[in-house]
Image (cartoon, grey):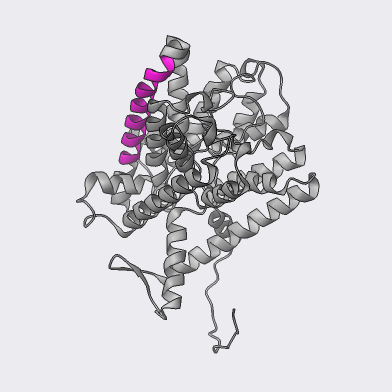
Amino acid sequence: MALIATGGLAFLLPVMTTEPIGLTDALFTATSAVTVTGLAVVDTELALTFWGQLVLAVLIQLGGLGLMTFAVLVWSALGLPLGIGHQAYLREDLNQTSYERLARLVRTIFRVVVIAEIAGAMLLCLTFIPRTGLGTGLWHAIFHSVSAFNNAGFSTFSAGLTGYATDPVVNAVIPALFIIGGIGYVVVADVAGRRFWHGWSLHTRLMLVGTVVLIVIGVGLTAILEWNNPRTLAQHEGAGARLMVAWFQGVTTRTAGFNTTDIGGLHDSTSLLYMALMAIGGGPTSTAGGLKVTTVVVMVLATLAFFRRRNQVWAFGRSIPLDEVLKVMALIAIASALMFTATFLLIASHEGRFLDISFEVASAFGTTGLSRGYTTELSGFGQWVIMVVMFLGRVGPLTLGFFLATRVTPRLRYPEGQVHLG
């Protein structure tokens, strides 16, 4: 919240924008950047100067990397010791169980961020520099590399990446960046440092299998539903071009929020599919928001266990503890209540357009950033609602629940009672 407030005040400075913007627009832009969402009420290309875009990129980097992780990296660079209390907070933030693994993970995060973003920027220069010139093209490449790896979805082009819809470099580099950033640092560390499959943890296996399944569903259904839509895929000649656009839009939907086609031109069925994918999001300890892939996978496994009359949830030869299943139930319940409340408030305060409003809320919660063109039509109240949803979507609904809840040791045990369900 402090970073958002600082960023919002920075955007009010005259040097940041081509013309003055209001406080709410400034805070909305800062919130969208820190939560790596990508929803925009001001044009990044036309309304922000170079310095404004630079501040935006810094906020994206800090928000995506995580403030506590960034603080540890700076602390380590200065050679200062990390106290037990700070280690405990960071361990909770990165879902680690030991301090030894925590230190290794922080080093891995630093290496992955530096290598991925530098490599991504160098490759994107191959496309942007020939079209826009050396200096401008280099900045476009750096900004999009940072934005893509952190799953932010911000672009320095007013029309997004629609002008590069069939560019092979953009269609390879941008998805590679946000997929690596979105699967989580724990998974990256496992894949890079352990033996294939058998050496990977249960979390890594569930994450990778779930990601592959969601990519196949997203890309496949995008191609099927939008193949003959003249406002999206059908505006491109040839099956190869259409498949390329379907690939990019199908994989960017869950977390990144870039667009190479007109999102407002999607069929209603495709929009509903994208809302589900955006709500799922990416992986834990990653740059993505939403419910998280592993949450949905555990929910499916628990449902299958119930119908098979099993009293244990397991996958790949490992059981999943009951408290994790209860955490999944709490997460889904809180997320559902949050999205319902936000949608209700926006519909009650705005005129019609149920699909556009629901899409906006799902995008904000999943910190995705895709929009059917409704973001700029939000009232001041609507912007504040979306800001709250973006914030909670990034820090996680369970964080809110743990913050509000009080742990009390039970002194009594009650006899079981029967409740009729379903």
Residue 283 appears in the figure: no
Magenta region, main secondary structure: helix
Q: Residue furthest left?
A: 195
Residue in the picture at 54% in, 81% down? 411
Q: Nearer the viewer, residue 11 or 353?
A: 353
**Relative to the observer, which residue lies in front, 222 or 289?**
222
Q: Is residue 183 above or below residue 265?
A: below
Residue 355 at x, y = what percent? 68, 48
- Can residue 109 be found in the magenta stretch? yes
Q: Residue at x 59, y 44 (%)?
A: 363
Q: Quadrant of residue 96?
A: bottom left
Placement of the N terminus among the 4 image quadrants:
top right
Q: Which residues are magenta?
A: 107-129
Compared with 121, 96 (above or below) is below
Foreground pick, 128 / 57:
128
Q: What residue is shown at x 35% (from left), y 39% (from top)?
A: 109
